Image: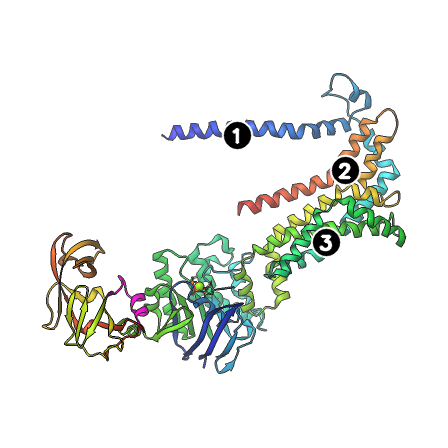
Amino acid sequence: MSNITCKKLTKKYADLQVVHGFDLEVKDEEFIVFLGPSGCGKSTILRMLAGLEDITTGTLEIGGRDVTTAEPGERGVAMVFQNYALYPHMTVRKNIAFGLRRSGLSAEEIDTKVNDVVQMLALAPYLDRKPAQMSGGQQQRVAIARAIVKTPEVFLFDEPLSNLDAKLRQQLRVEIAKLHKKLKTTTVFVTHDQLEAMTLADRIVLMNAGNAEQIGTPQEIYTKPRTLFVADFIGSPSMNFLPSTMEGPAAKTSVGILTLDAMDFTPSTSGSATLGIRPQNISLVRQNDSDLVLNGTVVFTEYLGNEVMMVVDCAGTEISIVVDAPNAVAEGIETTLYLAQEFLHVFDSESGLRLNND
Amino acid sequence: MGAQMANRITFGSISARVVLACVVIFAVFPVVWTLLNSFKEVVDIVTPTPKLFFTPTLENFRYVFERPSVRLGLSNSGIIVFSAVALGALFGIPAAYALAHMKSRVGDEIKFFVLSLRFLPPVAVAIPLMSIYLDLGLYDTRLSLTMTYVLLTLSTIIWLSIPAFERVPQNIEEAARLDGYGPYAIFFLVALPVAGPSLFGAIIFSFILVWNEFLIALMLTTSEAKTLPIVASEFTLLGRNVPWGILNASVIVLSIPPLIFLGVLSGFLNRMFKK
Ligand SMILES: Nc1ncnc2c1ncn2[C@@H]1O[C@H](COP(=O)(O)OP(=O)(O)OP(=O)(O)O)[C@@H](O)[C@H]1O
Ligand SMILES: [Mg+2]
C-alpha cells in the first residue's frame, strides 16, 4: 500500500506563507495531477512530498509511515524534474544505476534491473552516451528510467514535459500513461497544462494561491467547477461569464434579462450572481424550447481546423462560441445564439461558489 | 548570393586574422627575443645590429643551473608553491562548496571577507607577518612562506570556486539526495566531478599567482627560503657588465612551469567556453 496522506501541510519562507493547510488523501495506485497557474505552490508541495523542502507544519504519511521529517532518500519516492537533472558526467547506464548503488544489490542484480527499464523505455542505443549528447526527449526518458528502476512507492513529476515540443510532449504523455497502467505506482504529477491534466489524471487537484480549490476527477472539474476560479481556469477557449442581478429565476445581465426557468439552483444570498457557459455549449440553432436566446454580430472568427471559434458581440458584451467548421458564420454577419440551460452555471459573485443543484 | 556570402566571410576572416597576427607578434616578440638571447653569447647580444642567426650555446643555461642559489631557489619554489596550492585546494574547495550553498547573509559576509583578503596590498600583510615570524623564529623558512602563500591560494581558490559550484544545477544534487546519497557522497560523487574543470582552472590560477609572487617573498626571506623569482632578480646585481645571456636564461627557466600550466589552463578554458 503506497497511499499518501497530507494533513494540514503549510509552508512558510521567512514571512511569506505559500501553502495554507493543504489536505489530500491519495489512494494507492492513483494518478494525481496538481494543476494551477504559475506560482500557486504546486512545485512547493511536490518538493515537500519529496523531502526537498521542509514542512513548516502539518504531517505527511507515505504508505502509512510518518515521513514528515524523513530524508528524501528514505521516503521511497522517485522524482522526475522539468530540466531532467541527469548527472552530466555519467553515461546513461550509470545515471540509471546510480540510485541502486546505495541499495545493497549485487552488481548482477543491478545490471538486470537496469536492462529491464532500458528495454521498457527503448534506451538501449544510448546506454554509453553522456546526457549532453542526447535530445531533450531522450534525456527525459532516461530520467524516467532512473525513477522507475528504483521501484519506488511513489513517483513525483514536476512539469516533466514542459521543455519538450508539442509532438514529443504528446508521445511522452502517452508513454507515461502506459507506464502507469503497467506499473500502477502511485503518482503525483505537476503541470500547468490542462490537456495533460485531463488526459493523465485519475483525480485533479486544482490549486490556487497555496490552496486546493477543487479536488475531483477531470470530468467533475470540467462539468461541475466548484468555483468561478476553476470554471475560468479549465476549458479552452475559456468560459463566458455574465455578471447579473437575480430576481427569482430572472437574471438581469448586460445582454438583457435571461429567465432561468429550466434550472435548479440555490439563489445567491447577495442577489448578485455570475452566469457561466462554455463556448462549446452555445449553438447557432435551437436545440430545446428552454434555450436562452441572444442576438448579436460576429466580430471575429478563428479557424481551428475541425471547429471555428467565433466572437459574437451581443449588445456590447462579447461572447465566444465554438461551432463545427461548416456551420461557421462570417465576420460582420448578424446571428442568433442559443444557450442550453442544462450547461449553464450560476456562481455567487461574492464567494465565487457554484450554486447549481446537481 | 552564395558567392557574395563566401566573399564576405573570407574578407572578414582575413582582416580578423591580420589584426590577430599583429597583436600576437606584438605580445610574443619580446618573449621570443628573450628565448633567442638565452642561447647567445654576450657578444652576439650586445652587437649594434640585432642578430637572428648565430651559433647557439647552452653556456647560459649551464651557468644558471650550476649556481647553488638557483638550485636552492628552484627547490624552494617547488616545495613552497606546491604545498601552498595543495593546502589551498584541500581547504578552499570544500569551503567554496559550503559557501555556494549558504544562501544567507552570513554566507555573503564570509564571501566578502575572503575577497577582501585579496584587496590588501601584499606589503601591508608582509610587514606584520615578518615581525611575527621573527619572534617565532620562523623568519626565512619554507614553513613561514608556505603559510603566507596559503592565505593567497586559499582566498583565490575559494573565490574562483564558488561560481563553479553555483553553476552545478541544484536539481542534480537534489536528484542525488533522492537517490539516497548524503552530503559528503554528493560532494565527492556529483558536485566535484561536475564542477571539476572550473575548479582545475582555479587551482592553476592560484599556482601561477604564487609561483610569480615577488614582493612578499622578498620581505620574508633572506637566504634559506629564497624563491626562484628572488634569485633570478639577483642576476642583475652580478657586476658592471650586465650578463644578458644569463639573465635571459634565468627568465626562461622561471617562465617554463607557468607556461606549461597556462597551456593546460587554456585547454580547460576553451573546453568550458565551448559548452
Ligand atoms: N525559496 C523560496 N523563497 C521564497 N519564496 C519562494 C521560494 N520558492 C518558491 N517561493 C514562492 O512560493 C510560491 C509558490 O512557488 P512554486 O514554485 O511552488 O509555484 P508553482 O506552482 O510550481 O509555479 P510554476 O508553475 O511557475 O512552476 C511562489 O509565489 C514563489 O515565489
Ligand atoms: Mg513549479
Task: Please name the residue that numbered disc 2 is placed on.
Answer: B254
Image quadrant in which you'd find residue B55: top right
Q: Chain of mark 1?
A: B
Q: Which mark is residue B58?
A: none
Instruction: Name which residue type carries label 1.
Output: Ala
Instruction: Give the residue pinned by disc 3.
Output: B88
The answer to whether the beta carbon of the residue marked 2 is less than 8 Å from any atom of ligand 1 is: no
Q: How is the image coloured?
A: rainbow
Mark 3 touching mark 1, by CB under 8 A?
no
Q: Which is more foreground, mark 3 or mark 2?
A: 3
Near-viewer residue (A37 or A72):
A37
Q: Which residue is label 1 attached to? A: B16
Tell me the residue at 86%/31% (across/down): B237
Q: Which residues are magenta?
A: A227-241
Q: Is residue A232 magenta?
A: yes
**Amino acid type, mark 2:** Leu
Alpha-carbon span between mark 3 and mark 1: 40 Å
- Label 1 crowd (10 A; few <14 / some 14-19 / many >=20): few
Q: Is residue A353 left or right of residue A42?
A: left
x and y percentages locating residue A158 in the rendered image: 44, 65
C-alpha gap between disc 3 and disc 2: 22 Å
SS at circle 3: helix
Q: Position of residue A148 (x, y in %)?
A: 47, 69
* Left or right of A319 on screen, residue A336: left
Q: Earlier in the sequence, mark 3 or mark 1?
A: 1
* A357 relative to A145, above or below: below
Q: Earlier in the sequence, mark 2 or mark 1?
A: 1
- Assess disc 3: are there few (<14), some (14-19) or many (≥20) residues with their C-alpha within 10 Å of its C-alpha: many
Q: Is residue B110 above or below residue B13?
A: below
Residue occupying the point 49% across, 71% down? A11
